Amino acid sequence: MIEIRIHGRGGQGSVVAAYVLATTAIDVGRFAQAFPAFGAERRGAPVASFVRIAATPIRRHCQVAQPAFLIIQDETLLELPETLAGLLPGGGIVANTQRDSQALSDTLGHPVHALPATRLSRDTLGRPMPNTALLAAFLTLTNLLPVAGLKDALAQRFKGDVLARNLDLIDQVAAATPAGLWQERAHATSA
Amino acid sequence: MRQALEGSQAIAQAVALCRPQVVAAYPITPQTHIVENLARLVADGKLGCELVSVESEFSAASVALGAACAGSRAYTASASQGILLMSEVLYNIAGLRVPLVLTCANRALSAPLSIWNDQQDSMAVRDAGWIQLYCADNQEAVDITIQAFRIAERCELPVMVCVDGFTLTHTLEPLELPSQEIVDRFLPPYRFSRGLDPLAPLSMGTLVAPEYFTEARHLHHEALLAARQEVEAAAADWAAACGREQAPLVRVDGPPEATIGMLTLGSVFGTLLDARDQFGGPPVKLLHLGCFRPFPTEALRAACTGLEHLIVLERAISPGADGIVGAEVRSALMELDHPPRVHNFAAGLGGRDVPLAIYPRLLDAIGKPHPRMSAIDLRPELLPDKAHAAGEAP
């Protein structure tokens, strides 16, 4: 089982990102769970959501304390100490930022894959919605689930032009991300 | 086919498959998604039922009661303060022996104000005369919601389906939804034997003098006790209809020779299953009390025979007494020849996470002196300084 925590701000869709990732896993035959950090959500406030993916049914219903990977929708959250709390050694961080991966990795002490997901989504979707780019990068890096599965999961939520733009964005990001770079990390941090 | 569904969404779809004729509800966290999803199904023309938006939970329960009295299959959902505001009507629904189904998305009660999960709300109305079923996971929430309508209609008693708020309602998991054909066969159209009918007028809920009141209460008690059979029959017939087996009263998982047992209600059960695998240790029988009303005394005694220690872990307390479930379990087991020692702990109050690490803590705790009931996840460092609390200089 592998555990992932998504950090964002209320309104950025961190719960939707978690649900989409878990749906992708379930639809390709894996077992998965996704849930928000339960609380009163307010637009702009720091929020988090969680995903578990496993080969067998997931029976536990507790919070994720030691995620293997973090997906960061808003780079200012990297300043909060709780954002990195519990991140497993050997894991990694996919962050929406214009900053440089290596410089961030050095600062944070964990491998970081940086991508300008907000800019990419503005350019392709016309809106600042970083989820699709972040998830496409995460799946391409880890090979945890096929990127085609992510397209199918988005097709359940969107249609028409919005869907077409999202699928285009997935292709752009997948082509620009080193495929399988973190595959070993994903393997090593699975319990 | 397994599909990815949020618990609330799955419960709403399960309710819709039961073809309710009237749904009345008032939004309250963490229940809101259930009725939102039902409202969407109605608005999309996928569910032909009367959806009544009301101004309070008192009215939601009253509308469901009135609809059920008129012979409709009725449903409502609530949580926490909403359940308390309904409580007067909940007693009336049960006392009038009216079948309907309510989902309680379990949440703590004020004060202090908490929107998070525990089971104090449904426990607060345990004596209202409803059947109360607790779901260990979202698949059970789907299956038991459908069974609840049949149990209610066969027993002419209301059924409260209790689902841990957030922990289940807001969690997306792979779930199996049955087909409409399976549900239609399992749950035929319903006719209330005492339904209101203008051609055959009758009054319900009239004043009952001391001459008859005891008998009415006696019959209600007897009806709830007898409902055990319908709870079991519904689970058996549902297993035959869709292939998913359930132990509806007390689920037992673990080696028969185990001398330690742990009993819970709700979503903590799955966490303990994983924890037992992860931590190992002595053989432990895990028990899930799926049916709290009627209380499954015989099934519980059978499940606990041979145990030396039984840990009861619950998400509610009776301040000034014990745990609520713990006290009832102690009472039920007293008549065993060799009853286990019951160790009663609360955990997860007001949404505190119950992690896998609770399992070794519980096993460790039974070897040490402890009060009749205490919160195993209490953090003493957060308590006010005792001297300070007593008004002395710190």
Image (cartoon, rainbow, N blue to C red):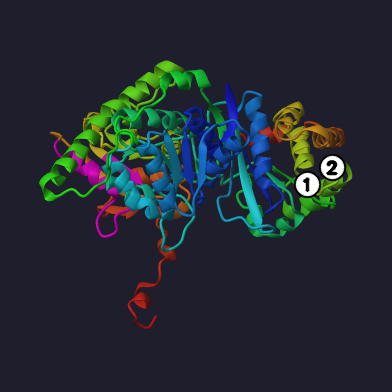
Q: Quadrant of the N terminus of chain B?
A: top right
Q: Which residues are magenta?
A: B310-335
- Tag 1 residue: A129
Which of the two residues, A144 or B216, is positioned nearer the viewer here? B216
Q: Is residue A1 above or below residue B370?
A: above
Residue lying furthest front in this view? B199
The chain that hosts pointer 1 is A
Tag 1–tag 2 contact (CB < 8 Å): yes
Q: Give how far across and how far down residue A93 sits, in percent.
A: 72, 45
Which of the two residues, B69 or A38, is positioned nearer the viewer here? B69
Which of the two residues, A35 or B88, is positioned nearer the viewer here? B88
Give the side of residue A89 with respect to residue A74, left or right.
left
- Badge 1 and badge 2 both on one subunit: yes
Q: Give the image quarter of residue A19.
A: top right
Residue sitting at x 23%, y 37% = B308
- Tag 2 residue: A125
Queried whether the magenta region covers residue B329, the answer comes back as yes
Residue lying furthest top in this view? B240
Q: Give how far across and how far down residue B198 sits, in percent.
A: 34, 36
Q: Can residue B35 be seen here?
A: yes
Residue sitting at x 84%, y 53% = A99
Amino acid carrying label 1: it is: Met
Queried whether the magenta region covers residue A64, the answer comes back as no
Q: Give how far across and how far down residue B313 sits, in percent.
A: 34, 45
Q: Give the image quarter of residue B262.
A: top left
Mark 1 lies on a secondary structure that is loop
Residue lying furthest left in this view? B211
Amino acid carrying label 2: it is: Leu
